[in-house]
């Protein structure tokens, strides 16, 4: 576990063969991004695009651009509309074309400045731009700092479902400036805790002692983010491409959660809110099929409630639409459902024992 010293960034290294990269966590990293980027061996050009969204641009783009300029990097700003709807092929094309018009070439690099939407979209654009350019992730939401900026999953949605087009493209550097979380609206702050509670559930029961206490989470923010990054890094190191089943455990709560996100038209629920509902269903199935103790399940649900996250599905969200999207989910292999269950807090496994009928019932049971 990396040490977190007040005033100093913590550093977690994602140890991938031939492509290790650093994740720095702490306050005040944005104004230092130019200097930190210049220290990355994989970055060999002084030309870059900073991709951000319409909410983050007025808050942080100038600090990042100024720091890059100071380090001799000429960067162009590409801004997409805020929100999940920007995770689309159309927006990816637009971003790539702006990069081309700005004169970026295959030696240039991209910087993703924003939440998980910008990280997934800009990471994907970097993966396909001139067959792949380096990407620096500068996550500015809880979701993106504790989860999406690390691990190299990039991609976009289609009307058929979440993240169905994409690529593995590991970042070359991640700068999680916890100071940027101060401007997050409460709803966006809270949604991040669905992924944190997920990490605790599948991998580190002791993390729940901190994560279930909203006041302690704010006070010990850098420690919280660093512990989550360390969990994510360890999982990615073990199973970068989700082939052995270890990385698949990160999908706990996501099968039904992604269905709910799509059924809500990608606008009604924030990602973490949909995942919260997916976690409640997965916890219930774990108690029923995997021997998870009821009190441990109740503790997880109480932790979600402590952040005001939804634990019951509103009546007007059609369950049929959730089921339709789930059938197209990547976690269904040749019609076989690979569903993550918990046997106890901190220990999860992939099960093939969840039938389509049981899954449908679990989605319906979220109503009451
Ligand atoms: P988001 O990127 O839409 O950010 C949420 C909102 O906060 C947006 O309106 C954004 O403009 C705003 N915002 C961002 N930073 C801000 C700041 N510092 N101050 C004020 N406002 C700010 O959503 P998200 O929750 O960060 O990410 C969700 C996305 O991440 C989903 O698309 C999900 O699928 C994806 N995700 C990907 C992975 C992965 O491994 N690649 C993992 C988890 C989630
Ligand atoms: N967020 C799931 C993964 O990175 O594998």
Image: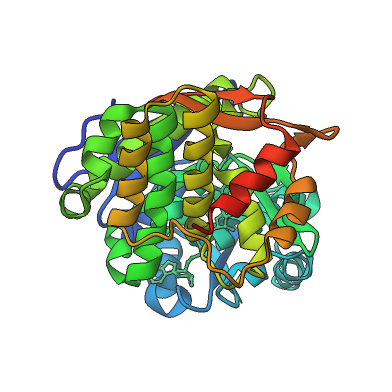
For residue 206, which quarter of the picture? Answer: top left
Q: Which residue lies at the image location 59% right of the left edge and 60% below the top edge?
A: 48
Q: Residue 87: x, y in percent?
A: 67, 64
Residue 47 seen anywhere in this rendered image of the structure = yes
Q: Is residue 149 visible?
A: no
Residue lying at the far right of the rendered structure: 334
Residue 50, picture quadrant: bottom right
Q: Which residue occupies the foreground of this view, 368 or 242?
A: 368
Q: Position of residue 57 (x, y in %)?
A: 47, 76
- Left or right, 219 with respect to 221, comes to left
Which residue is nearer to you in this view: 291 or 267?
291
- Give the quarter of the figure containing the N terminus: top left
Looking at the image, residue 231 lies above or below residue 176:
above
Q: Position of residue 292 (x, y in %)?
A: 43, 26
Q: Estimate the x, y position of residue 239 in percent, counting from the top left.
A: 60, 23
Is 344 on the left or on the right of 106, as rendered? left
Instruction: Say which residue appears at 49% left-offset and 45% top-offset.
Output: 279
Rendered residue at 46%/30% (across/down)? 287
Q: Residue at x 61, y 24 (%)?
A: 350
Total numbered badges shown on the rendered structure:
0
How did the renderer colour the structure? rainbow
Above or below, comparing residue 244 to residue 11 in the picture = above
Of 351 and 355, which appears nearest the observer? 355
Place residue 66 in its image quadrant. bottom left
């Amino acid at each position: 576990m990396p040490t977190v010293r007040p005033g100093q960034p913590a550093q977690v290294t994602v140890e991938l063969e031939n492509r290790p990269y650093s994740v720095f966590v702490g306050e005040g990293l944005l104004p230092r991004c130019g200097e930190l980027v210049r220290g990355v061996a994989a970055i060999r050009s002084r030309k870059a695009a900073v991709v951000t969204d319409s909410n983050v641009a007025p808050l942080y783009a100038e600090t990042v651009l100024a720091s890059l300029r100071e380090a001799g990097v000429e960067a162009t700003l590409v801004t997409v509309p805020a929100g999940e709807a920007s995770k689309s092929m159309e927006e990816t094309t637009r971003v790539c074309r702006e990069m081309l018009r700005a004169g970026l070439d295959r030696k240039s690099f991209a910087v993703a400045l924003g939440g998980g939407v910008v990280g997934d979209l800009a990471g994907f654009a970097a993966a396909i731009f001139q067959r792949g350019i380096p990407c620096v992730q500068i996550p500015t939401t809880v979701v993106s700092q504790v989860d999406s900026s690390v691990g190299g999953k990039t991609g976009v949605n289609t009307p058929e479902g979440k993240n169905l087009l994409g690529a593995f493209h590991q970042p070359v550097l991640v700068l999680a400036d916890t100071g940027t979380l101060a401007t997050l609206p409460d709803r966006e702050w809270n949604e991040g805790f669905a992924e944190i509670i997920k990490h605790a559930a599948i991998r580190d029961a002791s993390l729940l002692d901190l994560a279930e206490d909203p006041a302690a989470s704010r006070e010990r923010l850098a420690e919280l983010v660093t512990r989550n990054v360390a969990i994510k890094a360890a999982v990615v190191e073990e199973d970068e491409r989700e082939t052995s089943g270890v990385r698949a455990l990160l999908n706990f709560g996501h099968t039904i959660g992604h269905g709910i996100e799509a059924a809500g038209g990608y606008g009604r629920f924030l990602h973490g809110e949909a995942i919260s509902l997916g976690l409640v269903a997965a916890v219930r199935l774990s108690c029923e099929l995997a021997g998870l103790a009821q009190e441990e399940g109740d503790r997880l649900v109480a932790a979600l409630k402590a952040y005001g996250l939804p634990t019951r599905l509103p009546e007007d969200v059609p369950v049929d639409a959730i089921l339709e999207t789930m059938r197209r989910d990547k976690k269904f292999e040749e019609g076989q459902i690979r569903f993550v269950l918990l046997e106890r807090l901190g220990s999860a496994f992939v099960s093939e024992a969840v039938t389509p009928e049981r899954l449908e019932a679990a989605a319906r049971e979220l109503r009451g």
